[in-house]
Amino acid sequence: MEPSLQPGDAGLSDAETPAEPHPPRKRYAGFAVAAIITAFVALFFEGRLPPLNIAAAVLALIGLRQIRRDPLRYKGRAFCWLAVALAIVVATLAALVEPSLAT
């Protein structure tokens, strides 16, 4: 019966044993990317489509939740907050610029 081999038994010292592989790289959360793209599309349409502003904000909130649940896997918190801020600014400017319906 052959004894089991340990890392030090193969002729390598403990310092020479191969290290564990690197942890997986963080990637941008899909909802964060979708939120920032939607916010920029809403900006392109100059606030004429309010559902786009709402969609950007909702996607950003879902992205923040996704990042909070798995912070070792996802990044993109700044994208989410930028999308929320951009949606608010576009909605505010659209409300200020549009003529009132009472005239």
Image: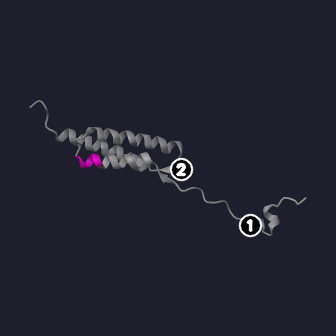
Residue position marked by numbered label 1 in the rendering: 15
Which quadrant, please, contains the C terminus? top left
Is 86 situated left or right of 101 in this image? right
Alpha carbon distance from label 1 to label 2: 29 Å
Q: Nearer the viewer, mark 1 or mark 2?
A: 2
Residue 83, given in percent of the width and then of the height, sits at 35, 46
Residue at the far right: name it: 1
Q: 10 Å neighbourhood of mark 1: few (<14), some, or many (≥20)?
A: few
Residue at 87 percent across and 59 percent down: it is: 3
Residue position marked by numbered label 2 in the rendering: 73
Q: Nearer the viewer, residue 61 or 33?
A: 33
**What's the magenta bit mostly, secondary-structure-wise?**
helix
Is 63 situated left or right of 71 in this image? left
Residue 22, given in percent of the width and then of the height, sits at 61, 59
Report how many numbered discs are placed on residues in the image. Answer: 2
Which circle marks residue 77 in the picture? none
- Residue range in magenta is 41-45
Q: Nearer the viewer, residue 29 or 93?
A: 29
Q: Amino acid at mark 2?
A: Arg
Q: 10 Å neighbourhood of mark 2: few (<14), some, or many (≥20)?
A: some
Magenta run includes residue 84: no
Q: Amino acid at mark 1?
A: Ala
